[in-house]
Image: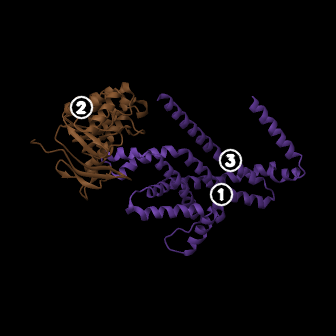
Chain colours: A purple, B brown
Amino acid sequence: MIALASTVVFALVVVLVVSNSRGWPEVQRQFFNGEFFRESLRVIPKAFLLNVRIFLIAEVFILVFALFIAILRSLPGAVFFPLRALAIVYVDFFRGVPTILVIYLLGFGVPALQISGIPRGELFWGVVALVLVYSAYVSEVYRAGIDSVHPSQEAAARSLGLSQAKTLRYVIVPQAVRRVVPPLLNDFIGLQKDTALVALLGPVEAFRQSQIEVASNFNYTPYLVTAILFVLLTIPLARLTDWLVIRDRRRQLALGAAR
Amino acid sequence: MSAETVLEIEGLHKSFDVEVLKGIGLTLEPSEVVCLIGASGSGKSTLLRCVNLLEPIDAGRIEFLGEEITAPMVDANQVRRRIGIVFQAFNLFPHMSVLRNVTLGPRKVLGLSEEQAQGEAVDLLRRFGLLDKKDEYPDRLSGGQQQRAAIVRALAMKPQLMLLDEVTSALDPELVAEVLDVIRELAESGMTMLIATHEMSFARDIANRVCFLDNGVILEEGPAAEIFSSPQNQRTQQFLQRIIKAGRL
């Protein structure tokens, strides 16, 4: 009740401050135009489907590729040092370079090489760039999960005669993945937004489409529409993440109480 | 003995930062039950982990059924599938039901079919009174049930030697008996076992031989009755006196 009241008061204050500002009539006309809003709704959601596609395709590859990198990084022993080093260099590089640069370099650089048999499409390289960048982040999430599985689990698996690979597959990775689902979803929320960066290479996704709309009408309302679409897409994932975190905490509390 | 010696350890040395095992020699004949006693940190657990090749050794040799398992190029996975180990903290796989815990090794290491592995697992679980728990996850079981499930998991590989590493130390006192009963039954069925334990009266009952480990060496070794009633070594006497004072013997 108090929360509701204070929220209403706060919202009122914000609305009053904004709507009484000197530039408000102009901003209202430029960003909140009902006619352009309706017109944008006809075109932009269609373009937004491309964002969703980019996101879904990239996500699948990231999940697999990042796990591969994480496993490379957690291989024990001196023999595997080159692979570990490779994985570390990869992660350092793609976490360090701004996403936008990776997209430019791959999207304009690789097709320019004109190697036969290599795809030239901007969309293709845009997705590849997102996969490379986000795999670096997600592999670190996986790795934290793998490291969080107690060594005694590995000892128990190995003591049954399971090989290193089977120990990872049946004992370590399943436990690790379960633990990192919330941070993984968090990274995917970031990925959903960054699909807009692919527009820089040319494909007409929601952001690009809204730029076109803005340019043809001299009105910024299409940007608002795009922003709303992105928020609508990320909210379910954000709530799912929250719910999983809460469920995990409850489960742990219940276990603690049982012991 | 006519049958082949199960385990023969010679001059075993193992260091981490400090030397933990300083030349251990020990032999187990078939169906023999040997208990390792000694203070925490005396090297009991390390010795068991070395036998299961979970820890590489620095010097010495270990023979298992006539094969030198500490030789270079020995396939550790081949050795481990024939030696069962049960840990103090159970180490069940928390993401698997009891049945999956028990069948993982037989399915993925021995290559048994799903039905065959489950059939054998169900028999074992029934034998140790866990059949009604087969679909439960480990966190729903009591400590005693978890430890019994861990023993069943090791037995499902049909090991020729069982290593028990203080398997009752993490249990509430009222749960210790059910686990000791299981071990007693195993001993009666002829399982060869090397047991690190703090349960002195249990060791006295069950062990053919008792080894007193102190600071990385076996100071005294002999039939349980002898060690507990008339220990020769002064350190053994002191250790047992402390145990008696604590009311644990």
Report the residue at 66% width, 55% height from top: A47
* Chain letter belonging to callout 1: A
- Residue A223 is situated, as x and y percent measured from the top left of the image, at 74, 54
Tell me if residue B118 comes above or below residue A162 in the rendering: above
In the foreground, A76 or A12:
A76
Q: Is residue A256 left or right of residue B235?
A: right
- Residue A147 is situated, as x and y percent measured from the top left of the image, at 47, 49
Extreme-front residue of the structure: B234
Q: Are marks 3 and 2 on the same chain?
A: no
- Specify which label sits upstream in the sequence, 1 or 3: 1
Q: Is residue B3 left or right of residue A73?
A: left
- The amino acid type of the residue labelled 3 equals Val
Could you say which disc has been placed on residue B228 in the image?
A: 2
Badge 1 vs badge 3, beta-carbon distance below 8 Å: no
User: Which residue corresponds to mark 3?
Assistant: A231
Instruction: Please identify the quarter of the rendering in which residue B190 is found.
Output: top left
Residue B113 visible, this angle:
no
* Chain letter belonging to callout 2: B
State how far apart marks 2 and 1 are (Cα).
77 Å
Q: Residues within 10 Å of mark 3 (few under 14, many from 20)?
A: some
Report the residue at 80% width, 39% height from top: A11
Extreme-top residue of the structure: B174
At mark 1, the secondary structure is: helix
Could you say which disc has been placed on residue A196 in the image?
A: 1
- The amino acid type of the residue labelled 2 equals Phe
At mark 2, the secondary structure is: helix
- Residue B210 is situated, as x and y percent measured from the top left of the image, at 23, 36
Q: Is residue A182 left or right of residue B130?
A: right
State how far apart marks 3 and 2 are (Cα).
74 Å
- The amino acid type of the residue labelled 1 equals Ala
State how far apart marks 1 and 3 are (Cα).
13 Å
